[in-house]
Image (cartoon, rainbow, N blue to C red):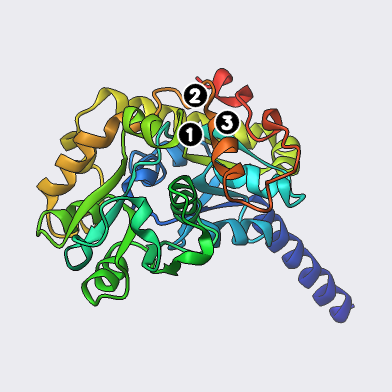
Amino acid sequence: MKRTHKTLAAALMMLGLNSYAADKITIMVGGMEKQIYLPAKLAEQLGYLKETGLDIELLSEPAGVNAETEMLSGAAQGVVGFYDHTLDLQARGKLVQSVVQFSQAPGEVILVSKAAGARIKSPADFKGKTLGVTGLGSSTNFLTQFLAAKANVKNSEFTTLPVGAGSSFIAAMGQGKIDAGMTTEPTISRLTSTGAATVLVDLRTSKSTEAALGGPYPAACLYMSTAWVNSHKPQVQKIVNAFVKTLKYINTHSAKEITEKLPPDYYAANKQMYIDALEAGKQMFTADGVMPEHGPATVLQVLNGFDKAVQGKTINLASTYTTEFVKAAK
């Protein structure tokens, strides 16, 4: 009888653990400290994620491609990363979709190091150079490859080096490991404020993005496996509600007010610099989480310019995002 009771108790305990694991929702962020992914941490800091009543855990990976891998392996239910991954994954036979769109521009730039400034005046000069990206297969890699291809520079004619963001990107540039590279705030301001780098291509606003890429480029979003979304609609709705509420907060508050809600380590020891960068780039965020019109078509056009996984494939853009949840958000 004792053995039976122990076995039953163990079984019940395992059932409880499995239930807990099933209830936990993990969202991987492709670099939590990056300003482009601000809505993720801000939603947590404002208490909006807790208000959902769900057990939501935010985890950070240095590059979006690493976060994507975590989701595909089942270690996470969602990714805060770039929308372009949904198209690339569909071309590879994996269905995922953006459920809330954070931004309508990449919020990134290509920086050229002070040492390479005289040798790189445009993407046409990428030939023979080493360019930094957050990770191979990341959106910074996608966009760098497109800008090179647009300038008639083949991928085989330059080297891309995964260097992450923040201090690791700054170190790579300072040590001469990369001549130029694509990164985001607050890394941009940390390098340009000291004269260590200058901006070559600016994708921080809708206007500059359209000039460089040919149209609106929806970037940061929350994307999830289509199968998981379809089988967990109540949970997805609660999560989207929290993020839409956060986007409205960003749209109706100053950069200073927003920054006050963030942990001090987000400022990289210079709070005012972070505030100034956010004030300049705040317009990249959508006000309501809705996918920008014509945005998906621009992303497909960009990927078709260099991505061999996408080229020649029929991509169903309508299945790469949904507005069902943002339209129902309260």
Q: CA distance from mark 2 to mark 1?
A: 7 Å
Residue that mark 3 sits on: 296
Above-or-below relation of 16 to 245:
below
In the picture, measured across the screen, residue 175 lies left or right of residue 235, that is: left
Crowd band around label 2 with a 10 angstrom C-alpha radius: few (<14), some (14–19), many (20+): some
- The residue where tag 1 is placed is 218
Q: Quadrant of residue 70?
A: bottom right
Q: Residue at x 34, y 62 (%)?
A: 165
Type of amino acid under label 1: Pro
Label 2 belongs to which residue?
292
SS class, disc 2 = loop
For the point 47% across and 50% down, the residue is: 152
Q: Please tell me which of labels 2 and 1 falls first in the chain.
A: 1
- Give coordinates of residue 14: x percent, y percent: 74, 67
Q: Secondary structure at mark 1?
A: loop
In the image, is 101 to the left or to the right of 8? left
